[in-house]
Amino acid sequence: MKKIAINIIIISMLFSCTDELDQIPLTNKELSIFLRTETEVEEYVNATYAALQSNSLYGLYLPAMGEIPSDNTFDEVPANDAAVYGDMDEFKTIPANGIVADNWRGSYIAIQRCNVVLSRIDKVTFKTEATQKARVGEMKFIRALMYFNLVRFYGDVPLVVDETKDPNVFFGQGRTAASLVYEQVIKDLNESIAVLPATAVPGRVVKTAARALLGKVYLTQKNYTKAKAEFDAVISANVHGLLPSVADVFSLTNENNKEIIFSVQFAAGLNGNTEGSIMYQQFAPSGTVSGAKGHNLPTKELYAKYTDADTRKGVYVALTPGGVPFNNKLKRPTVITDGASDVVVLRYADVLLMQAEAENEIGNAVAARALLNQVRSRAGLTNITSTGQDDLRKAIELERRLELIGEGHRWLDLLRTGQAISVMNSWFAGNNILVTVAQKHLFLPVPQGQIDTDPAIKQNPGY
Amino acid sequence: MKTFTIKKWQVLLGCLFLFCSVTRGQSGNPKISGTVTSENGELLAFVTVKIESTDGKIIQGTTTNESGIFSTTTLKAGSIYNFFFSYIGYETAVVRGYQVNEGAGGSILVRMKTSASNLDQVVVIGYGSQQKRFVTGSVAKIGGDQLASYSAGNFAQQLSGKAAGIVVNDASGQPGSNPQISIRGIGTLTAGRNPLIVVDGFPLTEGTSFNYINPNDIENLEVLKDPASAAIYGSRAANGVILITTKKSKSEKTNVTLDVYTGFQQKADKVEYVDAYDAAIYFTEARDWGYVSKNPSARSVTDDRATRIAKGASLRELPLNYLAPYLSKQPGLVNTNWLDEIFREAPMSNFNLAVNGSSAKSSYYASFNHFNQEGIIINNGLKRYSATFKLDSEVSKKVNFGLSLNPSYTTQRFFNFNGGFDEPIGMVTAMYPFFRPYNEDGSLAISQQIIANGPEDGALIENPVAAIKMTTNNRNFFRLFGNTYFNYEIVKNLKYKFLLGGDFASSNFDFYNPSNLGAYRTPAPKPAAASETNGTSNNYLIEHTLTYTKKIGEHDFNLLAGYSFQKENTKSTSITGTNIADDNIPNVAGASAFTAIPERDRWVQVSYLTRLQYIYNQRYIASATYRTDGSSRFGSNNKWGKFPSLTAGWILSKEKFFPKQNLVTFGKLRATWGKSGNNQIGSYGSLALITGGNGANNYVYGSALAPGFSASTTPNPNLSWETNTSYNFGADLQLFNRIDLTAEYYNATTSDLLLDVPVPQQSGFATSLQNIGKIRNTGVEISLGTNGINLGAVSWTVNGNISFNKNKVLALAPGQTQIISGGSSNIITKVGASVATFYGYQVTGIFKTQEELNSLPKLPGTLLGDYIVKDENKDGVIDTKDWIPMGAYLPKFTYGISNVFAYKKWQLTLSIAGVEGRKIFESNFATREESGEGFAMPTKYYFEHRYHPVNNPDGFLGQPNYGNFSAARRSVRASDKFIYDADFIRLRDAQLSYNLTGALLAKAGISAARIYVGGNNLVTLTKFRGYNPEATTGSVLTSGQSVSNYPVARTYLIGCNINF
């Protein structure tokens, strides 16, 4: 009895389970053993596109950031949602603003996903090399788009183009000069133009998208010749064009039409309503739908600029029964938080107007006028006849407001053309609102959280 | 640290009585006889009686006979003698200076008191036990009956104030909530903060709910406070270890005890909102000033609605359309006090039946418990049914084994109190008194405020009474834990123990929100929402230990060696249903589309442990422990943690030089050093996890869904436990044999803090989990205990403790000087300061004139009626550089006093717990009730003290403003206006009881019965105006941020304990 007991004890005490100490996650994949196959790389690429759908980017905030400070749109109830929109509308944005914090973070999440794919894709064998090249081009395009947005909204921003192995190395690194960021943007876009296909499945980046974006970068830098070259290439590629009817451009049944060069995709009713956006609800006038917040509403002044002949009136911007203008490019979803409208980033009409701007600045007034009139005549308007550079400037500017309302361009246009302060100050004065726009407002503040985390990141002046 | 159990017999009975009477002896010497009894009058046989002459010479030794009587005829008349009575289990009784009278006999009656010295108590220390007098570490022992004076569903609530160094924060009074237990301050920032709970040797998984342990089953609870004591639990012990010993049979007789109480609870806080008439004034002021302040020169408060719209007013600048009758003070209008509607007096009851006994070689203990606590918020509460079965059996002198099982079933009507507009306390902050909870026909009024407030964008809140009553939010838990052990004495002094423990838990959460109920900003009907979460976990422990004890002369050795293996698997599935056609099936089954999120988790721990305890001459004590833990949670480069400790003690009072006197009857000095770890870092924290398959990662090309996956965390193969290294110095004194005094100093440094460090976001991540940083906690603890002081006929037992703690962050991540947290980014964990220190502006007044506004430095966006804040750094600019530290939630000191007064059959217990030097950031007040933003309901305090140039020109709180609520006002949320003193003194429990006796009871088969009336939290003295002065969040970094914290109830109870 005693011997048996002792033996059992000794044997059982020798029993050891140290092998059990290596446990792998049961319901998660792990990065060190991921992106080894084409399928896995594609999953990461999908997640990179998905980052663009985030509320921090094209899911909600970017269209508002690009327009709400301008005279195109305003915030119906400025105090709503901790005044994150209201403050931007009224140039009271504080460094702790939630939109700013989310947008900054969301941009770098998207960038890092690009970096991960780009750092690993070369080691993976794809069934067709063209697919692999296309994915490289798509990632470089998305990275360039993110940096282009960041540099326009915030000025100097940290520049990272490698996969993060240790996040601690970024402490003390600070912001990179905007000029260097632009260099990287141009480099990425040129490299992506080299490998992207002319056409692809809906939603994916194509060569013309990269060219259109590069043109826009040059336009922003006032490099009109280079801008013109890119826009020419987009136009002559002949894969895009204006739709005959403005009603078809944003129709849910006609998404990814030939006028759309690049859009961030949304769809309703998928996977538990997780692929739609809440933008419709957030941008609907108060009381019109449940949870409506009245953010980023078109102003009455803008609505008044659509003449009765303009086919875009009531199609791009419509009125509620109460007479409040709203962005009708966003289509009302069945489940109010699951909007299916894609968010257009680059559109042929935008390219035509940018090309018109480039031609006009170079001095090709006739060419500029023709491009402008393409957009006008599609909207049922008569042609502009003047060839005066300044007349055309004003006409192009107005056309951009009317054509691109709600797509997040106007504030960036004002910044690009250097009119932000003068236009907005006269607008506020005209509307009897005590707001003065100053030089500091041309950049958003860097998120306070980032400065708190790493004092090497300095705040923009004036904040 | 010392505490001890108060036994009724200690307090109810006096100590020693001496009666002398004179009788004449038969022989030459007088015959002296005596009777020795116990305190309750039992005759004590075989008591050793020693008689000494006054010069210390032993005259005679004898014993009492079976009737407890002794006699002697050897004492000389006229001489004086001292009598010493000793008997195992009793304190030595002494009769001094007894003079034997010439020619006369004598009789002595002695009542012996049961041995009561706390020093002889056995203290459980983890993998063993030790006499209190030899304990060198810092171990608090609290008896089950000491806990039971606070009637509650879990022991953690009962623990508040009962021992030094243990702070219990009852942050939510929601039935079933688990209070936070902080042992010796806070030693972690983002890892788990839960102490390890060990029930009869079985360590429950960290963070386990306390509700599954029936407090009535607890015999004793020991808290291992210093890492040296806790080191034997290695990587799980840094937050302290709570050892629970459950009751077992104490006698051969079958005992049946019944404990029953019932009572009611009520809201006892200071939160009060204004009534409808004052609310109407407030909302009107806020909307008017919002309108006018946007452009005072062009706008006037007298502008009517149409004029305001024409001048570009936003919705929030228009007057609410239905307030006119209220403003004209028309009587009899709807005037609902919503706090009264959602709060109630709620019943609480407990039924506990325990049976124990033993036969020849086996003993058993069984209990059945039903605990029912309704919440003080309607439709909220907890019911628990639980049982305990224990069996211990001695197979032979060398072999014994036992088994215990603890099944329980708990149901909870639950709300997630997070301040949102879908939970009762969040909703009621913005529910206007102009609306009724019920329609005339008694049905619930739905969406009235949402509809009425729509045109002017007031608070669009659903009726909270309807939301509470119509929403299903049930949680059920089944749990079974227990263990079985087998002891075998291999050879003399060498004992082997095998322990197999198991814990199985399953839970089911059921949520349904019907379509005919509105939601924030959404009037009914809306799509119904439904979800269900089912989880199971199993955990098992295998442990082998060998203990060898040996005494060689004056050397006592005790050697322990052991091996332990523990593994836990958890699984859960959350199912969310959408497209719910109607409200016919009020659960997730009514949906027609589902998304499911499955989660699984597993951890494994393998440990080797050893301990040597050594005592020399009952005087010098030393021990050393070493434990090494391997954990699946740790990164591949750091799989094994090592946790040593050393302790030493010196019992001074045993030394020859220690003067023999009655003042200091025991004295001990002790010191410990040790390391322990905190492994609550998540099971896969060291890995860069890929998440996806969800909305944030999937994409849709056209309409084709494409699954996406991406990294959600950064990798860290070095990730490991947090290490707490500490020193503890203590002194124990016993005075007059009955007053125990303990003083301790500790210095504990946690290094390798597990920090989810905010990292520069250009990394693609917001935070990264790392072992970085250091925190130090230092403190002094003093406790005092007595065994019953006689104040005339009243016996008084008092236990008191006071603990001072100082917390200091020594380091964070490289280059990181602070971690900023909290809803207003003003809770800062900074190197050199205490964890989670509040910062804010100092408000010095209100801008009442344009001249002030023009001349004084001010926050950006400041309007008239906003706050003047102090330009602390005098740079002419108001920004966060003007913030000053304003204290922290972590208290400077805490104290507790427990009293038991006994008088004949009456007994009164009073326990007080107090906290000093605590601050709370009332974020609900800051953003809603006292913000002055005309959205939420104002408190009476705010309304009375708000500034309004006409209606209340002397007010000192910011002017109500809605449509133009300024960025400055939002910034002032971080200010002394919302950081409150939350010191409190609480009469934690009070109980008056009476012991029933008499023939009638005996006839009913009742051997003892006690009835009592009492209550919990009957008195709370605090300046704090929010719901709960213990309010805090789960995260250490936002400690003391109050958001909809459920108030702790005041409770009145009546109950009885009956022994059959």
Image (cartoon, coloured by chain):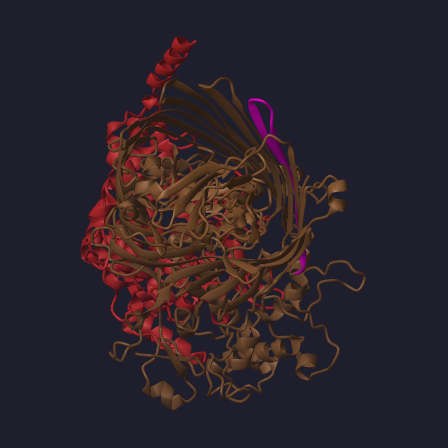
Chain colours: A red, B brown
Q: Is residue B422 visible?
A: yes
Q: Tell me where residue B316 appears, x and y as whole percent.
A: 55, 73
Above or below, B602 relative to B1049: above
Q: Tell me where residue B814 appears, x and y as whole percent.
A: 21, 51
Judging depth in this view, the residue of A95 and B649 nearest the camera is B649
For the C terminus of chain B, the image quarter is: top right
Find the residue positioned furthest to the front.
Answer: B28
Find the residue positioned furthest to the right.
Answer: B441
Q: Residue at x 34, y 34 (%)?
A: B633
* Magenta stretch: dominant secondary structure: strand
Q: As drawn, is B655 to the left or to the right of A204?
A: left
Judging depth in this view, the residue of A417 and B974 nearest the camera is B974
Q: What span is colored magenta in the figure?
A: B344-367
Judging depth in this view, the residue of B186 and A201 nearest the camera is B186
Number of marks present in the image shown: 0
Q: Is residue A242 visible?
A: no
Q: Tell me where residue A109 appears, x and y as whole percent.
A: 33, 46
User: Is residue A272 on the magenta stretch?
Assistant: no
Judging depth in this view, the residue of B629 and B619 nearest the camera is B619
Q: Tell me where residue B68 appears, x and y as whole percent.
A: 56, 39
Above or below, B511 relative to B779: above
